[in-house]
Image (cartoon, rainbow, N blue to C red):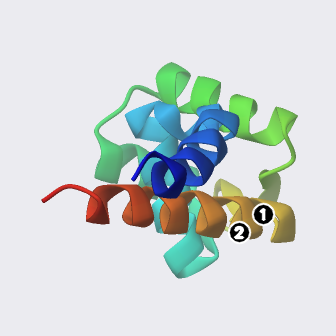
Amino acid sequence: MAEKVTEPLETLEKGGIFSAQQRFTIMFLLYLHKKAGFTELQKLLQLTPGNLNHHIRKLEEVGYVKTHHILSWRPLKVIEISKEGALAFREYAFNLRQLLEQIE
């Protein structure tokens, strides 16, 4: 039994960036929708602008998201998941699911 759990656990430990619930949720939403506006994420997650910005910066530092500004009738900050971020999140979620399936 220990052999089955080892690999998912090691992968989950490597995916420590997702251990913060807010970053996991940001990545989950971006994985589903590819991109989202800063204000939209802030409302969905009920975070302060500074707190959300902190989590986005952490994800940017490891290359999992990219941000850019769009000028329309008002400036809009858009957060987009990178290809590396999508792959890393998918692997993390897959291994988390495998680990949870071990619970009987």
Q: Is residue 50 left or right of residue 57?
A: left
Of badges 2 and 1, the one in the foreground is: 2
Give residue 40's quadrant in the image: bottom left
**Residue 57 vs residue 10, the one in the foreground:** 10
User: In the image, which disc is placed on residue 87?
Assistant: none
Kindly check if marks 2 and 1 are in contact, taking CB atoms under 8 A apart as contact.
Answer: no
Percent coordinates x, y for residue 82 in the rendering: 81, 65
Does residue 2 appear in this view? yes
Q: Which residue is mark 1?
A: 70
Q: Label 1 amino acid?
A: Ile
* Total marks placed: 2
Percent coordinates x, y for residue 46 in the rendering: 28, 38
Tell me: residue 28, above or below residue 33. above
Q: Which residue is mark 2?
A: 86
Does residue 39 appear in this view? no
Q: CA distance from mark 2 to mark 1?
A: 22 Å
Q: Dot 2 surroundings within 10 Å: few (below 14), some, or many (20 or more)?
A: some
**Residue 85 vs residue 12, the one in the foreground:** 12
Report helix, strand or loop for mark 2: helix
Image point (57%, 43%), residue name = 12
Image point (62%, 52%), residue name = 7
Image point (64%, 65%), residue name = 91
Tell me: residue 94, above or below residue 69. below
